[in-house]
Image (cartoon, helix red, strand yellow):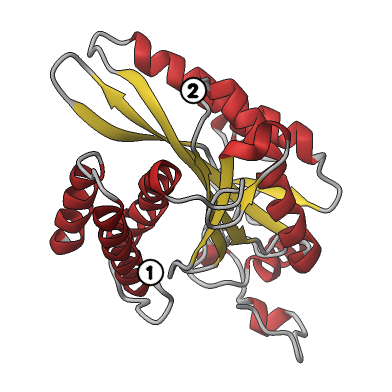
C-alpha cells in the first residue's frame, strides 16, 4: 500500500509540472497504470484485505481521475465533453461519475462524483444530487431496500500545509417508498454542510481549498434480520412491561414467545429463567439463523 501511496503522490506532484503534449501523454499512461493497480488492489477477489487499505485505495481511485481530467483539458481536445463519461448539460457539465470496484462485505456498489469546476460546496452537492439519485434509484429497483452513505472529499489548507480530508455521512436505510430528494437533502447535503462549517470554524485554521469528489457507498439491507438482544432503556425496564431476553443464539423470536407463555418472577431477562424453547414449542421446519 505504501508503494501506491508514493505513486499517487508523485503523479499529483508531476501533474502540475507537465509542459508539453509528449509529457502529457506519458503522465496519462502512468496515471492509467496506477488506477488499474489500485482497482486490482481493491477488487472483490481480495476479500481478506484490511478494510482500511481498501478504503484508502477507493479514495485514491476517486482522486486520480480528477487530476487526469484537469490535464486532459489543458492538452487534449475531447470533442466538447469530458473524458470518462461526463455529464454535459447544464450545471452538471463539470461532474463525472466513476464506478469503483471494491471488496467490502455486503457492498452493492461504490462510486464517486468527481468535481472539475465547482467551487461552492452547496452548489456542488445539489448538482451532484441528480447523479447520485440516479444510481440510488437503480439500486433500489434492483434490490428493493438498501443502505447508503456518502463522503465529501476536499483539499484543505492552512498557512503552511495541505491535506485531503473527508466528511462522512451516516448509513441510512432507503426503501422503494422513500422520498429520494428529501433523503438526499436531510441526510447528505445538510449534514455535510454543517460538518464543513463546524470544521472550518475550529481554531486549527483549516479551510476548504478545492472540492475533489463525493463518494457514494451502496450496501445491502436485510430489514427482516433482527438481533437477539436489545438493551431496554432503564425507564422502560423499570416498568417491567417489556422483556428482552439475553440469549447466545439467534432464536430471539422463540425466546420471546416462551417469555410470554412462562412468565418469570425473577431475572426475566435471563435465558435460564425459562424452559428451553425446543422443549415447549413445536418448531418443526423452522430454522433460526
Mark 2, secondary structure of its residue: loop
Quadrant position of residue 103: bottom left
Number of other residues with Cα within 10 Å of mark 1, as a class: few under 14, some 14 to 19, many 20 or more: many
| 130 in relation to 22, above or below | above
Does residue 267 show up? Answer: no
Q: In terms of sequence position, does the residue under pointer 1 or pointer 2 come before the other?
A: 1
| 270 in relation to 178, above or below | below
Number of other residues with Cα within 10 Å of mark 2, as a class: few under 14, some 14 to 19, many 20 or more: some
Camera-side residue of 136 and 158? 158
Q: Nearer the viewer, mark 1 or mark 2?
A: 2
Residue at image coords 67%, 84%:
287
Camera-side residue of 156 and 8? 8
Quadrant for the N terminus in the image: bottom left
Residue 71 locus on image (x, y percent): 37, 45
| 235 in relation to 259, above or below | above
Does residue 117 show up? Answer: yes
Camera-side residue of 270 and 162? 162
| 239 in relation to 229, above or below | above
Residue at image coords 14%, 55%:
6
Residue furthest bottom in the image: 285
Residue 159 locus on image (x, y percent): 17, 13
Mark 1, secondary structure of its residue: helix
Residue at image coords 13%, 18%:
160
Residue 136 locus on image (x, y percent): 70, 52
Residue 216 locus on image (x, y percent): 55, 49
The residue labelled by disc 1 is 39
Tag count: 2
Quadrant for the C terminus in the image: bottom right
The residue labelled by disc 2 is 119
Residue furthest right in the image: 177
Tell me whether circle 1 and circle 2 mark residues in contact (CB < 8 Å): no
Amino acid at each position: 500500500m505504501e508503494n501506491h501511496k508514493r505513486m499517487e503522490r508523485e503523479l499529483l506532484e508531476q501533474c502540475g509540472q507537465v509542459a508539453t503534449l509528449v509529457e502529457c501523454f506519458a503522465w496519462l499512461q502512468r496515471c492509467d497504470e496506477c488506477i488499474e493497480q489500485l482497482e486490482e488492489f481493491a477488487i472483490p477477489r481480495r476479500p481478506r484485505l484490511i478494510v482500511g487499505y481498501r478504503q484508502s485505495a477507493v479514495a485514491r481511485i476517486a482522486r486520480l481521475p480528477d487530476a487526469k481530467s484537469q490535464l486532459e483539458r489543458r492538452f487534449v481536445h475531447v470533442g466538447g465533453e469530458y473524458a470518462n463519461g461526463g455529464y454535459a448539460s447544464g450545471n452538471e457539465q463539470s461532474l463525472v461519475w466513476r464506478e469503483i470496484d471494491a471488496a467490502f462485505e455486503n457492498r452493492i456498489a461504490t462510486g464517486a462524483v468527481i468535481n472539475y469546476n465547482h467551487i461552492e460546496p452547496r452548489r456542488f452537492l445539489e448538482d451532484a444530487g441528480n447523479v447520485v439519485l440516479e444510481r440510488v434509484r437503480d439500486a433500489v429497483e434492483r434490490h428493493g431496500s438498501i443502505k447508503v452513505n456518502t463522503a465529501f472529499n476536499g483539499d484543505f489548507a492552512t498557512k503552511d500545509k495541505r491535506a485531503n480530508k473527508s466528511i462522512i455521512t451516516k448509513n441510512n436505510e432507503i426503501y422503494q417508498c422513500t422520498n429520494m430528494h428529501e433523503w438526499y437533502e436531510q441526510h447528505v447535503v445538510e449534514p455535510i454542510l454543517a460538518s464543513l462549517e463546524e470544521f472550518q470554524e475550529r481554531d486549527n485554521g483549516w479551510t476548504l481549498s478545492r472540492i475533489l469528489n463525493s463518494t457514494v457507498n451502496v450496501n445491502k439491507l436485510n430489514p427482516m434480520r433482527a438481533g437477539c438482544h436489545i438493551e431496554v432503556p432503564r425507564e422502560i425496564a423499570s416498568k417491567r412491561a417489556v422483556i428482552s431476553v439475553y440469549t447466545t443464539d439467534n432464536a430471539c423470536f422463540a425466546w420471546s414467545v416462551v417469555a410470554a407463555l412462562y412468565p418469570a418472577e425473577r431475572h426475566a431477562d435471563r435465558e435460564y429463567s425459562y424452559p428451553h424453547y425446543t422443549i415447549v414449542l413445536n418448531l418443526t421446519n423452522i430454522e433460526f439463523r
